[in-house]
Image: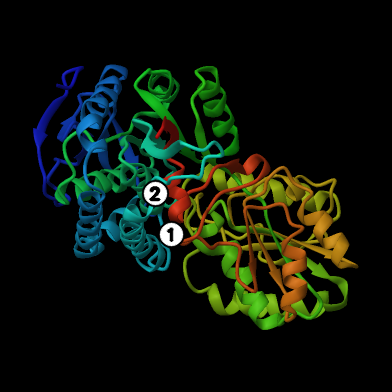
Amino acid sequence: MATNGSQSHSNHGHASNDAFDHVVPLLINGKQVTTDTTFEVTSPTTGKVIWKSSSVSKPDAIKAVEAAQAAFPAWSKTKPSHRRDILIKASDIMKKRFAECVEYMDIETGSVDNMSGGLNVPSSIEQLRDVAGRIIGVTSHVPVIAEEGKSAIIYKEPYGVVFGIAAWNSPYVLGFRAITYAIAGGNTCVLKGSELSPRCFWAIGSIMQEAGLPDGVLNVIFHRPQDAAEVTSAIIEHPFVKKISYTGSTATGSIIAAQAGKHLKPVLMELGGKAPAIVLKDANLQTTATQCAVGAFLHSGQICMATERIIVHSSIAKDFASALKTACEQIFSNEAPAPILITAPSVKKNKKLVEQALSKGAKIMIGDLNAKEDSDNRMRPIVVEGVTKDMDMYYIESFGPTVSIITVESEEEAIEIANDTEYGLSSSVFTEDLAAGLRVAKQIETGAVHINNMTVHDEPNLPHGGAKKSGFGRFGGSTGIEEFLRLKTVTWTD
């Protein structure tokens, strides 16, 4: 049972906003666990406390790991078709609970419907179905052995307990992918959700429970910020935990990878980005401008794949600037409230980056740095031109509604600047010449390159992950399931 005076009860259905007395519970071994230690969850939209959340203690975190370990022997032996059916049912349940999930995300993260109801929830529903359809196709195989009279088989086996850590900004997509690929492969999971959006992560556990996932196969926890180091370290170093996946900042990912490395545990890392969009001189400017604007400012730029640098050939720079201004005016109305960022420090960071760039000679092409907003966590999009290597904005991930315009004289220079970053998650190339687009794409050091589409692109049937300090390993497609399976070679003499 739970510790520190925490209480638990079974609940295999979903709950209304009032069902927890405004305290979001943990999910440990099939039980909804409400702890005495809680933390407040504030909506970035209103600045008001919306509810409290349970906060996992180190002993309860260990209980979650132990529950996952206890569930592993039986779950790892289940038929692939059984796992498939649970994921399909979960997809159907999430579709029924669509409005509930959208509401949680909008309230907790400040997202608007085109991000929550338009992208995040539908993508999660599709992800569940896509993974379900791939389970049976991930099979062991029989290779040809060189020596006559001997045979072999290569088994694909689950690791055991997988510890998944997911970020707040896209809670359903990131949360589900942290568990679905692992569970599909026969692993069990402890999912640690962000303290900024705990009810979204609670919903993931609730949906999987309602779909019939056995107790202990998935455990969902969250904690107060001050408990992060103690809880995370305790789980990583626990001998039952066999693999870790993490989606979040590069700085925190480095710490987690180091801790996992100390215990020789494999990790999957999807980290920060500084996505470039290269605009070649034959690009369709209207399409390019729209894709760059949405790619830079969707969800207030709080996406790891967000466009941060637009690299434009000088011969079209003036026309592109005009097209970009038109696109921004059409997409982002000045009459509407300014977009919301999750916290006020995010606004301060972005303004500081712009101010430093201006002090070194850059200019604002679009936007007003001094615009007065209704709250200190709102900020309208800003486009800065003339950004150079001596400016912080050139290198630092803004994770907000600011983007740089960099002018170049050649394709080679564009590629050089695109790669002049420690990150390598996503990128775009805009051109009417597919051969040129593919030529450039092969030279960009990112996990994905999108030709004539924005840098924000992630769908469940495609491998997704980064290069350089944007991480390693891949979610998505059959590759995502394979990430959570290890190979075992068995040989015998006929």
Q: Residue 482, located in which quarter of the rendered image?
A: top left
Q: Residue 157, located in which quarter of the rendered image?
A: top left
Image height of 273 relative to 216, above or below: below
- At numbered mark 2, what does the secondary structure look like: helix, strand or loop? helix
Image height of 62 relative to 19, above or below: above
- Near-viewer residue (462 or 136): 136
Q: How is the image coloured?
A: rainbow
Label ID, residue 177: 2
User: In the image, what residue type sits under mark 2?
Assistant: Arg
Image height of 312 relative to 275, above or below: below
- Near-viewer residue (207 or 360): 207
Residue 158 seen by the camera: yes
Residue 387 seen by the camera: no
Quadrant for the C terminus, please: top left
- What's the residue at 31%, 35% (across, down)? 189
Label ID, residue 460: 1
- What's the residue at 87%, 62% (across, down)? 412
User: In the image, what residue type sits under mark 1?
Assistant: Pro
Asked if the residues shown at circle 2 and circle 1 are in contact, with their CB atoms under 8 angstroms apart, the answer is yes
**Which comes before the other along the chain, label 2 or label 1?**
2
- Percent x, y of residue 329: 60, 77
Disc 1 crowd rating (10 Å Cα; few below 14, some 14-19, many 20+) is many
Question: What is the tally of numbered marks visible in this picture?
Answer: 2
Question: Marks 2 and 1, how far apart in space?
Answer: 9 Å
- What's the residue at 42%, 52% (across, down)? 170
